[in-house]
């Protein structure tokens, strides 16, 4: 069974993407995407890295609004196929889907410079902590402009230690059981 998500704004506004009906998939809600892209200055961003990309909706929204290149990391073969299919249907250029565990990708690739990094790991795991640790240790945060991460509202992890030297929190909000945080690199603040 397939579900659909609507792209909110930009070049692909109102276009639908298909997503597999998987119980472990939690696409970012439209309200959260709207808030995210109203807060960040997308004109500063030409590239994005989407970790645990799932449906790929964050990358599709970023591309629709002007990001030139998006790298999506996802380990689930069904989700990888779905993302690739949506890229083809929308005729998107500049999007690369990598079938990989996030930790393997971050450990084995030369640090790219990504203007926006989206992090939305499965809940009730240590993946958010491990991912921030790798991003910091591998210097992904140095030239990055924006960070975005989602977690369960019940997750009381202390993640600030990974980014408090490089980034400031712009928004830290909750809706339902989702907590989401938007950060800006201190070098890009006005």
Image (spheres, rainbow, N blue to C red):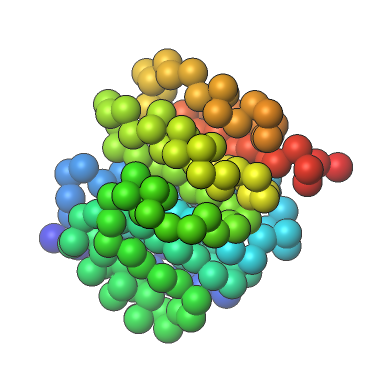
Residue 122 x/y as whole percent:
29, 37
**In this rendering, position of residue 35 left or right of residue 17:** right
Number of numbered callouts drawn: 0
Residue 57 shows in this picture: no
Choose top left, top right, bottom left or bottom right for residue 189: top right
Residue found at x 44% / y 54%: 50
Residue depicted at x 67% and y 50%:
143
Left or right, residue 177 beside residue 115: left
Q: In the displayed image of the protein, which residue is found farthest to the right?
A: 190
Q: Position of residue 133 (x, y in %)?
A: 46, 33
Q: How far across and down, in percent of the image, does residue 40 sit?
A: 68, 49
- 56 shown above or below 69: above
Q: Is residue 165 left or right of residue 30?
A: right
Asked whether 121 or 37 is in front, the reply is: 121
Q: Quadrant of residue 20?
A: bottom left
Decide: is 133 above or below 43: above
Q: Is residue 114 visible?
A: yes
Q: Which residue appears at 70% of the width and 41% of the height? A: 185
Q: Nearer the viewer, residue 4 or 103?
A: 103
Where residue 112 appears, as percent x and y from the top left, is 54, 59
Q: What residue do we see at 52% from left, 55% from top? A: 111
Residue 35 lies left or right of residue 91; in this view the side is right
Which of the image's four quarters has the C terminus? top right
Which image quadrant: the N terminus? bottom left
Residue 150 vs residue 17, the one in the foreground: 150
Q: Of all residues shown, which one is farthest toward the left? A: 1
């Amino acid at each position: 069974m397939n579900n659909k998500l609507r792209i909110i704004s930009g070049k692909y506004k109102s276009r639908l993407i298909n997503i597999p009906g998987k119980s472990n998939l939690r696409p970012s809600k439209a309200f959260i995407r709207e808030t995210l892209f109203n807060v960040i200055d997308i004109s500063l961003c030409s590239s994005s890295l989407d970790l645990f990309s799932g449906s790929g909706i964050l990358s599709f929204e970023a591309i629709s609004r002007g990001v030139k290149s998006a790298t999506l990391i996802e380990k689930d073969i069904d989700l990888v196929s779905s993302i690739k299919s949506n890229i083809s249907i929308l005729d998107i250029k500049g999007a690369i889907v990598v079938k990989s565990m996030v930790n393997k990708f971050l450990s084995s690739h030369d640090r790219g410079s990504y203007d926006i990094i989206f992090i939305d790991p499965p809940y009730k795991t240590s993946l958010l902590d491990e991912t921030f640790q790798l991003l910091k240790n591998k210097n992904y945060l140095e030239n990055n402009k924006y960070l975005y991460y989602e977690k369960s509202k019940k997750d009381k992890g202390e993640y600030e230690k990974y980014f408090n030297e490089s980034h400031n929190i712009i928004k830290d909000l909750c809706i339902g059981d989702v907590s989401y945080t938007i950060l800006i690199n201190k070098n890009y603040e006005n």
